[in-house]
Each structure stands twice: as C-alpha cells, then as structure tokens.
Amino acid sequence: MNSQADFSCYLCKGSIKVPVITIGHHAVSRCDSCGLGFLDSHVHETGEDTAYDEGFYTSQNMIKVPSEGIRECLPKVRSVRKYRPTGRLLDVGCGLGYFLAAARQEGFTVCGMEESGWATEYIRKEFGFPVWPAPLETSALEGSSLDVCTMWQVIEHVPDPLAALRKIRDLLKVGGVLIMETRNHRGFDAKMLLERWGGWALPYHLWHFDPASLRLLSETAGFRVLRLKVHKSDYVKKNLRKIPLLGVLRNPVASLFAGSNITVVAEKAKQGGG
C-alpha cells in the first residue's frame, strides 16, 4: 500500500488520499482533491488470480442465451442512437458480445475489443464479428475511423484509463462520441450497502469513480462532455417496493438518490487536448 508521503493522484496529482473501505485483503482509497478512488493494495501479494476466464463470467451471471442477452442490450443501443443513429461502432471490453450483436441488429457496423481469450472465442463462435485483443493502446485500428466507441462497465478495469481514452479519441472521427458507463462509488447505494455493494468487485476494479472524477477523466483525455447521467438508486427502489402504498412512488423517489451507476457521453471536438 502506498504511504501518504509518496501519494500523487493519477488523475489530478493531488497529494492527500482518504481511506474508503477495506474488504478482505484489499483496500480502496480516494483522492481528497478530485474524488478518484483506486485499489490501494497489491493484488500479487495475495496470490489471487484475476483472469477473465469462463469462471469469472459464470460467477458474475453473465453467460446467457444469446437472444436473451441481445434483448437486454437493446435499450443501451437505442440510447446510443440518440447521439449517433448509425455508423461504425467499437465496443471496448465487449465481454460476451451481446451489446455488439444488438447494435448490429439495429444497423451499426460493429467490432469489439476484449482482453479475455475465452470471451473472444465465445463471440467468434456465437456471432462472428471481428474482435481485437486488448490493450487498446496497442491497437492497429485506423485513426479517425470510428463514429462511436462504447465502454460498458469497463473503464474501472483498465490499468491506464487516460492512455485508453486518448487512444479512443485518436480512433474517433471528429464529432464521434464516446459513451462510458461505470460504477458510482460515492452514490447512496454504496454508502448504504458498504462492503456488500457490488460495485467494489475487488480486486477486479482498479478504479472507482464518482461524477466529478469521471468528468475530469474525460476532459483531461481531450473530450467535450455532452451529458453526464447519474442513475437512480436501486437500493431505494428495492426497499420502497416492500412498503404498501409507497411502492408506486419507488421510481420518482429513487431518482432523488444517486445510485450505483454513472454514464458519460463525450464528443471528439475539432479542438481539444490529448
């Protein structure tokens, strides 16, 4: 674990870190300046295997009947179409390919990038679209060739998020959009559930974002943020459902509390950093 004396925030270079939570062998801290959370322990010291193999996808209940997986992803595809109705789409960390299959069904030309060899083989067998191996930074994809890049619950796994987003910016056409969804470690759900909150997922999640740090990451990488959405609280929604008469109010009340997820939509503008 890094000492306070030698701490320098990855994102803003702040010098003070604050402990957030310890679960088993692992600890999460956050930068007191920008709010970025991070895995503040060394995975290899515990001898744990963090490979994204069949066992990982089974443990996360991610393996589905393909038609069911595609159907569940259609709302996400339709949310993407609000910003780009069609075009070439890259899904980074494409998992088992259900989102890409749904995007292809809705008219996009699709390709994926995935670290897991097991998942890549699964996609090739089930769907047959191209999947490149991670990491993104070494990709041979042509610059300014993409209309959309998506990252669904992926950026928290990436060792160097800034390098990854700068590479994505290079791959996007001017006006192309990046859409990222990740966990909100400072939301109401995380505060109420503590170590039981599923967003920690230690040691798989290396980074833990809140709205401010996710915006800062996007802007530091050279994007212009178009929208930042904080999703409503599933914790509140679930508990109100149990209360007679109040159950009908669960959605409007839950929208008043920050939930487990954040989505950012960002554009590659004509001028920008990175």
Image: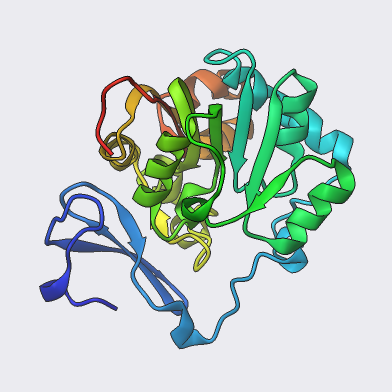
**Picture quadrant of residue 31:** bottom left
Tell me if 144 is positioned left or right of 34 in this view: right
Task: Using the rendered image of the protein, determine whether residue 129 is visible from the camera's viewpoint.
Answer: yes
Q: Residue at x 63, y 19 (%)?
A: 87
Where's residue 39, x and y in %? Answer: 38, 66
What count of labels does the image hold? 0
Residue 249 picture quarter? top right
Foreground of the two, 178 or 259: 178
Q: Position of residue 73 (x, y in %)?
A: 71, 31
Coloring basis for residues:
rainbow
30 left or right, relative to 143? left
Image height of 186 relative to 17, above or below: above
Q: Look at the image and tell me whether residue 244 can be seen.
A: no
Q: Quadrant of the C terminus?
A: top left
Give the quadrant of the N terminus: bottom left
Q: Quadrant of residue 37?
A: bottom left
Rendered location of residue 254, percent (x, y): 49, 27
Residue at image position (40%, 78%) is 42
| Viewer-side residue, 209 vs 148 | 148
Give percent across and percent down for residue 258.
41, 34
Q: Which residue sits at x=68%, y=37%?
A: 111
